[in-house]
Image (cartoon, rainbow, N blue to C red):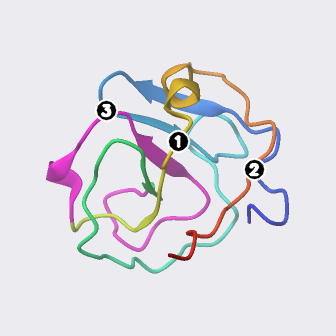
Amino acid sequence: MAEAGFYDGLVFHRVEPGFVVQGGDPDGNGTGGPGYNLKAEFSARPHLRGTVAMARSSDPNSAGSQFYICLDDAKFLDGQYTVFGQMTGGFEALDAIRPGSKMDAVSIEPKAKA
């Protein structure tokens, strides 16, 4: 979805200080999605500051386009959400996100090879 430009111009609709920022809703209010759901893919990856994961409802298989980024460690979420990324820099930009902050462009960078 990022490669197709789905997120470009969308906003972060949820900001919970010390917890998460959430975006990816085409409606901009936390109720929208892409029109389909994704199957959960839980892993042992921990929820640390900068973890990127799929937001969902109480149904584990309800994720669509919304995602969240942890503002601080949130170990109580471990094993319950699909974690798909980890920030390695840019934390000043993460900390500057406020409700309504726009995503100009979203891109995915593969992990650098060692």
10 Å crowding of disc 1: few (<14), some (14-19), many (20+): few
- Find residue 89 and report its horizontal and vertical position in percent: 52, 41
Q: Quick one: label 3 or label 2, which is nearer the N terminus?
A: 2
- Find residue 30 and report its horizontal and vertical position in percent: 55, 40
Q: Quick one: label 1 or label 3, which is nearer the N terminus?
A: 3
10 Å crowding of disc 2: few (<14), some (14-19), many (20+): many
Apparent side of residue 113 relative to residue 52 in the rendered image (left or right): right
Q: Is residue 19 above or below residue 60?
A: above
Question: Within the magenta stretch, is there residue 71?
Answer: yes
Give the Cα separation between the discs numbered 2 and 1: 20 Å
Q: Amino acid at mark 3?
A: Phe
**In the image, what residue occupies the spot 81% across and 36% down?**
104
Q: Which residue is tagged 1?
A: 89
Q: Which residue is tagged 2?
A: 7
Question: Within the magenta stretch, is there residue 98?
Answer: no
Q: In this orientation, which residue lies closer to the viewer: 13 or 95? A: 95
Apparent side of residue 85 relative to residue 71 in the rendered image (left or right): right
Q: Which residues are magenta?
A: 56-78
Q: Element type at marker 2?
A: loop
Q: Magenta part mainly helix, strand or loop?
A: loop
Give the Cα separation between the discs numbered 3 and 2: 22 Å
**In the image, what residue occupies the spot 71% across and 40% down?**
27
* Mark toward the viewer: 2 or 1: 1
Q: Which residue is tagged 3?
A: 19
